[in-house]
Amino acid sequence: MIEILNVSKNYTSGRGHITALADISLSFEKGQSSVLAGKSGSGKTTLLNCIGALEKPDNGKILCNGRDICTFNQKQRALFQRREIGFVFQAANLLPWLTVAENLQFPLEMNGIRGKEQTRRISGLLATFGLAGYDTAMPGELSGGEAQRVAFARAIAHKPALLLADEPTASLDSATGYQLIQLMLSLCADQRTTLIIATHDIELIEMTDRKIYLKDGHLETKI
Ligand SMILES: Nc1ncnc2c1ncn2[C@@H]1O[C@H](COP(=O)(O)OP(=O)(O)OP(=O)(O)O)[C@@H](O)[C@H]1O
Ligand SMILES: [Mg+2]
């Protein structure tokens, strides 16, 4: 359960004062899937980054199972991100010097999942994501869709409580993106992972339990 309470975030840049998030209050239930939609610049990435503790709001609280993540020190933040969160971005961001299997191994190692359980998880993820036989492939040898499948598999390998995806299908064709999101929705439902996806993709907006619209940093509607 994530509760966002009166969160605001402002930036000051060459363009002057920008309100990226204005007094947002919102909660996400465990296992629920949501889309964050809204025009470019409406605050989607800023909100995802605040929930993932990549950025700190200027005001407000973000309670994750009762703990305010905005008060975390660096070490608490790192542990929170490592154990409880999976991130997926528009680009797959795989580590190019590691094989596909080693990219999947990384979050497991970081969370102390080793030995037989690690091997079982990696082969299970490769099969689930249609990547059987890709263990020793290097990221540079993959298509965009294949690389993004590895990125999703890596993001959920450690069974995070929360998966945050920022425009995850933006570089894929619509059929590939749709299939990948279908798969993620069913995996997240099975694992009771809360999924929040920021997107412009109209097709994707219809797929999740909930749609949340942002406009100029304000919550427009919530379902
Ligand atoms: N580091 C920053 N410095 C200054 N302004 C920023 C910074 N990050 C975001 N902004 C501004 O905050 C507002 C919200 O940006 P954000 O990236 O959250 O929008 P978005 O909804 O994700 O847009 P897009 O759909 O284009 O990804 C925008 O006006 C943006 O220019
Ligand atoms: Mg964005």
Image (spheres, rainbow, N blue to C red):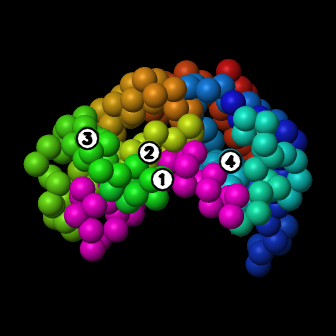
Q: Residue drawn at (69%, 30%), measured in percent from left and top?
A: 1
Report if the CB atoms under discs 1 and 2 are less than 8 Å apart: yes
**N-terminal label among 2 and 4:** 4
Q: Position of residue 41 (x, y in %)?
A: 66, 55
Identity, as a three-letter code, of the amino acid under mark 2:
His
Which secondary structure lies at badge 3?
helix
Q: Which residues are magenta?
A: 75-104
Distance in Å between CA atoms under marks 2 and 4: 18 Å
Q: Residue drawn at (39%, 25%), measured in percent from left and top?
A: 186
**N-terminal label among 4 and 1:** 4
Label 4 beta carbon within 8 A of ligand 1 = no
Distance in Å between CA atoms under marks 3 and 2: 12 Å
Q: Looking at the image, is 65 positioned above or below residue 43?
A: above
Q: Residue drawn at (63%, 42%), measured in percent from left and top?
A: 38
In front: label 2 or label 4: 2
Which residue carries the number 1 mark?
Answer: 111
In front: label 4 or label 1: 1
Distance in Å between CA atoms under marks 3 and 1: 15 Å
Which residue carries the number 2 mark?
Answer: 158
Residues 183 and 65: in front is: 65
